[in-house]
């Protein structure tokens, strides 16, 4: 009977419209979701695409193979460090590109190589003094404008007056190409050289070391302090108004803009404690302040996730609270804590604003030897390069960002790996 | 697993303590702060100095002229920098700040000139503007028929019929930049002096009217990143940009200069003063640090050597306009004798 009523019951137009509207709303909601994801992925793709397009050329570097005659007239075997290395370089280049040359032309020819060539040659000879009187063959980075020319970033079709390279300079470069002296190997200098004002020999070594030291300090401070604070709050602290206030403030602290921590660092660490400007130690302290709330929050969550039965079993066996925490609760929550810590450190790695305030955006041509020596960090190095006029720094800026993203990906991958491998579920 | 984690944590801590323990109380690196305009030149000298002598690489920080003066005049001792760069002479107030903090012997070193250029894309038409026209295009308030009104000009042709009929779009530095200070001082204030109604205002009101840039769109503060301005100029051939001459010099394949008062900026016109938008650049050296901070004297000597700031030297390759031969000799004498300043500017 009920079957009959259902089948014969007329479906009113209203009900159909209502159902269609609900279906349409469902469909729209799904479409909005897909559109939102699409937008996010699309923007990310555009970002990565422009970075790769802009930065890939900085991962290779034009080198020129030059035979340097180390004549005794320029370099005194008794005192090689004081030799006339400028002359060694210009002699070598003049032999490569023979023809009648005015002094001005000789100078221009020497400028095909990076300006620091004389120091490369000097260091190579100092390392191997036997070569004096003979010939030293080196692959030397080409000066930025020739590097850009070789990579096609400077168009040969532009009228000569509007180009940084003259037709004559292009002619010289083409001669060197015919001689088979030009090569474009992978740019190891990007990772192993410190900063330089010449894009062709500028690298990230100083920034990577500086970031490493700063993160080390940040970890050494924020990890133990964060865990101790979290253990107390989670396991021992009485539940009252004071602990509530502390809890709310820790959550607020996690949301404080990072520049505020930079100002704090400037006022407290530099001006009151008198720590040196630009030092990774100060950078690490500031980043530790920033990372601390994150670590406290993740540690508390990880501790909370350990089931009470573990604790009760421990107490049941007669263990003291200290024993229960050290022997059971903490080891079981460690994977979660480590994951959160690594993600917190990854955030700290990309942080720029506080480092600018404490002077970690200085120009230094050697990597720091310790946490007290002035240095830059990866994001501040990118900031400096983005502001430099030379054409080569445009691609190096993108390359620097790619390297930073690479480190972030690596750290996040480690965090995911730890979570997958070590995390226990109950 | 547990022991491995504890062990690695211990190793990392020990490594950190090891490096921390090794720090030295005194300083063996030269520390330099100051103007972002002088920054590239100081960078160049630092690198040359470090490579040549093998001494510790100087730490060069770009803090802006005013910020640099504050830090520089903070006191004497390893906690304070040895040199500050400036894109203008030291002010009297800064000189007094230095004196108060015991920095009583400072040598002023004039290193060269810098031109401010107004440039646009190679595709744009050649332009020749007077300072008065630039003021009319960029000021918040201008004089029209003897009245001071909010800037009504939208197109260049509104200002003068001989100028192209294109919208005014100018990218310029933000108020925090020394380039902006110099632009206001060298172009806006002078351009504004040609208008009688503004000239008749009270001193403060005049200064205010002359230096306030318009906020209604045509003048765009592009941040401190001059490379971004270059990109945007390439995208829009009607737009103009304001930046240091070194940026124009490095990008001469895509950009060209706007003539100001009939003169195009070039090494020659800036050096002889015929291009009117140029300014002197200085470094200030703390004499009390000479002989204390290793290498400071050698560094300054390298800065004022002929290979560096002379004609054809490596600073001129970066866009610095060299001083005349006599001025260079005078600078070298001042450095050699550590001439102390007796008053600010």
Image (tube, rainbow, N blue to C red):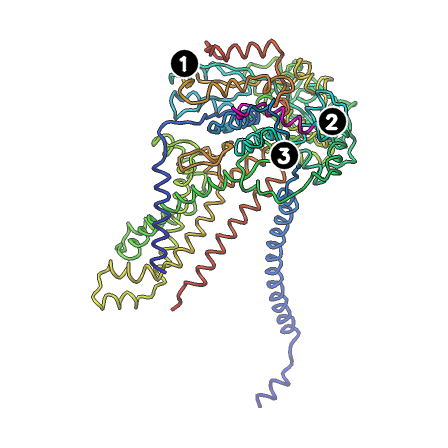
Q: Are marks 1 and 2 in contact (CB under 8 Å)?
A: no
SS at circle 1:
loop
Q: Are marks 1 and 3 in contact (CB under 8 Å)?
A: no
Of residues B98 and B84, the one drawn nearer to the viewer in this rendering: B84
Are tags 2 and 3 found on a single chain? yes
Question: Which label was assigned to residue A400?
Answer: none
SS at circle 2:
helix
Query: Mark 1 against mark 2, which lies toward the viewer?
Result: 1
Are tags 1 and 3 found on a single chain? yes
Query: Which residue is drawn at the image coordinates 54% and 23% (left, top)?
Result: A82
Magenta span of residues:
A77-93
**Does the image show residue B244?**
no
**Does the image show residue B274?**
yes
Q: Disc 1 to disc 2, how far (Cα)?
A: 51 Å
Could you tell me residue A231's position as x and y percent? 30, 54
Could you tell me residue A271's position as x and y percent? 37, 30
As drawn, is B127 to the left or to the right of B172? right
Q: Which residue is most to the left? A: A318
Which quadrant: the N terminus of chain B?
bottom left
Q: Disc 2 to disc 3, how far (Cα)?
A: 25 Å
Residue to which mark 3 is pinned: B227
Overall secondary structure of the magenta section: helix
Could you tell me residue B344's position as x and y percent? 48, 12
Query: Mark 2 against mark 3, which lies toward the viewer?
Result: 3
Question: Which label was assigned to residue B156?
Answer: 2
Could you tell me residue B96's position as x and y percent? 42, 14
Q: Disc 1 to disc 3, how far (Cα)?
A: 39 Å
Are tags 1 and 2 found on a single chain? yes
Residue to which mark 1 is pinned: B104
Of residues B55 and B224, the one drawn nearer to the viewer in this rendering: B55
């Amino acid at each position: 009977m009920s079957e009959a009523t259902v089948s014969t019951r007329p479906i009113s137009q209203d009900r159909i419209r209502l159902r269609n509207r609900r279906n349409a709303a469902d469909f729209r909601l799904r479409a909005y979701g897909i559109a939102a994801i699409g937008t996010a992925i699309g923007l990310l793709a555009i970002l990565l695409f422009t970075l790769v397009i802009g930065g890939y050329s900085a991962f290779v570097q034009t080198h020129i193979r030059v035979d340097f005659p180390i004549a005794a007239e320029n370099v005194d075997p008794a005192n090689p460090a004081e030799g006339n290395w400028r002359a060694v370089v210009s002699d070598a280049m003049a032999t490569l590109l023979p023809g009648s040359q005015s002094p001005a032309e000789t100078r221009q020819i020497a400028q095909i190589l990076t300006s620091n060539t004389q120091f490369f040659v000097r260091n190579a000879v100092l390392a191997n003094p036997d070569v004096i009187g003979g010939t030293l063959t080196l692959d030397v980075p080409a000066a930025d404008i020739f590097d850009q020319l070789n990579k096609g970033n400077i168009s040969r079709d532009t009228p000569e007056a509007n180009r940084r390279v003259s037709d004559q300079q292009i002619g010289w470069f083409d001669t060197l190409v015919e001689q088979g002296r030009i090569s474009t190997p992978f740019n190891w200098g990007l990772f192993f050289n410190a900063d330089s004002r010449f894009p062709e020999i500028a690298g990230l070594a100083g920034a990577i070391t500086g970031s490493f030291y700063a993160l080390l300090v940040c970890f050494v401070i924020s990890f133990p302090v964060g865990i101790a604070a979290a253990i107390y709050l989670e396991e021992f602290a009485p539940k009252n108004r004071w602990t509530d206030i502390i809890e709310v403030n820790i959550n607020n602290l996690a949301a404080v803009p990072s520049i505020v921590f930079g100002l704090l660092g400037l006022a407290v660490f530099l001006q009151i404690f008198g720590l040196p400007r630009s030092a990774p130690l100060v950078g690490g302290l500031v980043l530790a302040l920033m990372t601390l709330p994150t670590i406290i929050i993740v540690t508390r969550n990880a501790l909370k996730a350990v089931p009470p039965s573990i604790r009760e079993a421990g107490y049941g066996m007669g263990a003291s609270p200290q024993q229960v925490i050290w022997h059971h609760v903490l080891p079981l929550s460690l994977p979660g804590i480590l994951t959160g810590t690594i993600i917190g450190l990854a955030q700290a790695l990309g942080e720029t604003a506080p480092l600018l305030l404490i002077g970690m955006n200085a120009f230094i041509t050697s990597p720091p030897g310790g946490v007290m020596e002035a240095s830059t960090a990866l994001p501040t190095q990118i900031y400096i390069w983005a502001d430099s006029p030379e054409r080569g720094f445009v691609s190096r800026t993108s390359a620097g960002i790619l390297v930073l993203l690479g480190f972030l990906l690596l750290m996040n991958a480690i965090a995911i790996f730890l979570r997958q491998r070590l995390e226990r579920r109950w | 697993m547990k022991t491995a984690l504890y062990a690695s944590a211990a190793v990392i801590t020990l490594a950190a303590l090891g490096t921390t323990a090794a720090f030295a109380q005194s300083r063996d690196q030269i520390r330099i702060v100051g103007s972002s305009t002088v920054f590239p030149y100081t960078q160049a000298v630092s690198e040359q100095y470090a490579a040549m002598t093998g001494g510790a690489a100087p730490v060069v920080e770009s803090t802006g002229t005013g910020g640099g003066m504050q830090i520089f005049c903070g006191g004497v001792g390893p906690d304070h920098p040895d040199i500050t760069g400036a894109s203008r002479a030291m002010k009297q107030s800064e000189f007094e700040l230095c004196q108060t903090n015991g920095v009583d012997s400072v040598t002023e070193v004039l290193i060269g000139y810098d031109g401010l250029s107004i440039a646009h894309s190679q595709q744009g038409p050649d332009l020749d503007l007077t300072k008065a026209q630039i003021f009319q295009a960029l000021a918040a308030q201008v004089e029209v028929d003897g009245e001071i009104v909010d800037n009504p000009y939208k197109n260049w042709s509104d200002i003068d019929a001989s100028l192209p009929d294109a919208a005014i779009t100018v990218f310029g530095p933000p108020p925090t930049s020394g380039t902006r200070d110099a632009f206001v001082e060298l172009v806006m204030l002078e351009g504004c002096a040609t208008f009688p109604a503004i000239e008749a205002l009270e001193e403060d009101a005049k200064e205010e009217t002359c230096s306030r840039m318009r906020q209604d769109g045509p003048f765009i503060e592009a941040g401190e990143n001059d490379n971004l301005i270059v990109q945007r100029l390439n995208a829009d051939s009607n737009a103009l940009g304001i930046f240091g001459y070194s940026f124009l010099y490095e990008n001469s394949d895509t950009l060209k200069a706007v003539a100001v008062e009939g003169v195009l900026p070039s090494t020659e016109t800036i050096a002889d003063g015929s291009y009117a938008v140029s300014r002197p650049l200085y470094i200030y050296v703390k004499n009390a640090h000479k002989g204390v901070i290793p290498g400071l004297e050698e560094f300054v000597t390298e800065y004022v050597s002929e290979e560096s700031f002379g004609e054809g030297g490596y600073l001129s390759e970066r866009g610095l306009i060299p001083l005349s031969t006599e001025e260079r000799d005078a600078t070298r004498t001042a450095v050699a004798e550590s001439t102390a300043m007796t008053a600010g500017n």
